[in-house]
Each structure stands twice: as C-alpha cells, then as structure tokens.
Amino acid sequence: MSINISRRKSREISVGTVKIGGDAPIAVQSMTNTFTHDVPATVKLIHRLETAGCEIVRVAVPDMQAAEAIRSVKQQIHIPLIADVHFDYRLALAAIEAGADGLRINPGNIGQDNKVKAVADLAREYGLPIRVGVNAGSLPKDLVKKYGVTPEAMVKGALRHVELLHSFDFHDIKISIKASDVLVTLEAYRMLAARTDLPLHVGVTEAGTLYSGTVKSALGIGMLLYEGIGDTL
C-alpha cells in the first residue's frame, strides 16, 4: 500500500550545491561533535557522515580558531558546510570569509541590530543562506512573559528574527524551531508552516540519551514529514 504525502509548498534556497525547499528532495544534515579546530578529526568524521549518506554538515564555531579552521576543513570534504554561531557576530563574518556554505544563528543572541545587519550583508555578498534557529530554552523575555514557553512564543520569536533579516534585504532564509518536548515542537512547526513559505529544518532539540533521543526524534520528525512539513532534517 502506497501513501501519498502532499508536501507543503516552500520557497527554494541553496546550501552550496544542495537545494532546500521547493520541489527538492528532503535533505539530510548532521552535526559534528569534534572540536572544529581539530581539522583531522573533524574531516575524518565528516567523511564517515558522507559515506552514511549525509548531504550537509554543520560544525560548531565557538571561537575564532574554529572559524578559521573551516577553510582547511572545506578543502577536504565533498558536502556543503554550515557554521553554527552563537553570541559573537564576528565569528559569523569569519566563517563566511573562510568558505562556509551557510550559517545557523539565533539573531536574538548575536547582539544589536547593526551586528545582525553586518552578518546579513556579508552573507548576501557571498551568496549563502542563514538558518534562523530558535530553541524553546532561549526565547526573548518579552515573549516568554506574554505567552510562556509555548509554541506561539516560539513561532513569534522565529518570525521576529525573519522580519529583522528581511529589513536588511536578506531573504535566503530557512527556519528551525525546536523544543525538547515533542508535542510542543510539533505544534510549533504546524503553526509556523501555516504562517510562512520559508523552508523548514525539522528536528527535536536536547532529545536526551541515545535511546530516548532516538525515539523522540523519530516520533517528532516522522510525524512532521508525514504531514508534509519539513524541507531538511
């Protein structure tokens, strides 16, 4: 018995050579757990991920050493690389200049609007997309005060960040909106999918131990994909 799933219509963007959204197949991503500045270990792990079928890889960029290592890592891998940056916008700028194919940021913790603008301007110049990543545990205080830690607060937080990037004429955006609670995550994505045509990266954050994390992720991601929500995972 075949199951016909009608996927949500979304805008298409590109992460390096990989298309996300539109009519493109759902792309599989993973993240390294190495120190990014340890180039041999990072490259070795990415090669294993490539062999397993990973199409896009994300690396942590907690400091300038990691940002600068992206150049060497990129020279030795065959799939697009996304830099995961928090707090310091200068790390995002350095990662772009080092050859990252995309960024994952939370504009709310990058700093003042002018710093977000600097990142958006350079990303547009280099032609790479930004993933707005919102987690239930780091929502803006005003939204938490008004809505609590709820799907509504998560969606409003994500769309607030998107509007900020749009105000800087940046439009190559995808969104992730995650909570450790599967039901909260599901409802947040459903609400978000109804309010924007931007491509969505689906997943469950802080899923827990190997066993519980696998169950939570499979349940959450599986249900969203069954409902036609999700362009990459």
Image (tube, grey):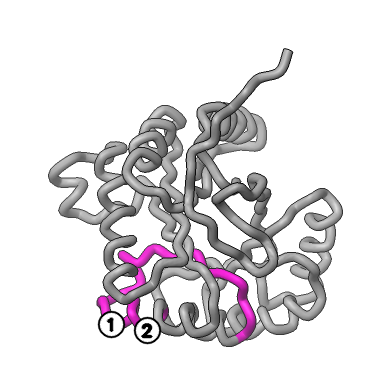
83 vs 211: above or below: below
Q: Residue 53 — which label?
A: none
Q: The residue tagged with tag 2: helix, strand or loop? A: helix
Q: Quadrant of residue 128?
A: bottom right
Q: Nearer the viewer, residue 149 or 34?
A: 149
Callout 1 crowding tier (Cα within 10 Å): few <14, some 14–19, many ≥20? few
Q: Is residue 53 left or right of residue 199?
A: right
* x then y, percent, for residue 11: 48, 54
Q: What's the residue type where badge 2 is placed? A: Ala
Q: Nearer the viewer, residue 185 or 40?
A: 185
* x then y, percent, for residue 174: 47, 57
* x then y, percent, for residue 207: 54, 38
The answer to whether residue 114 is magenta is yes
Q: Is residue 5 left or right of residue 10?
A: right
Segment tinted magenta in the rendering: 98-119
Q: Quadrant of residue 35?
A: bottom right
Query: Which residue is found at the position 33% from the left and 80% from the top?
Result: 117
Q: Label 1: which residue?
A: 114
75 vs 141: above or below: below
Query: Which residue is found at the position 28% from the left and 67% from the top?
Result: 164
Which residue reaches farthest top?
Answer: 1
Q: Label 2: which residue?
A: 118
191 vs 167: above or below: above
The N terminus is located in which quarter? top right
Query: Which residue is found at the position 67% from the left and 77% from the top?
Result: 37
Q: What's the residue type where badge 1 is placed? A: Asn
Q: Quadrant of residue 159?
A: bottom left
- Visible in this render: residue 216? no
- Determine whether label 2 and label 1 are within 8 Å by CB: yes
Q: The residue tagged with tag 1: helix, strand or loop? A: helix
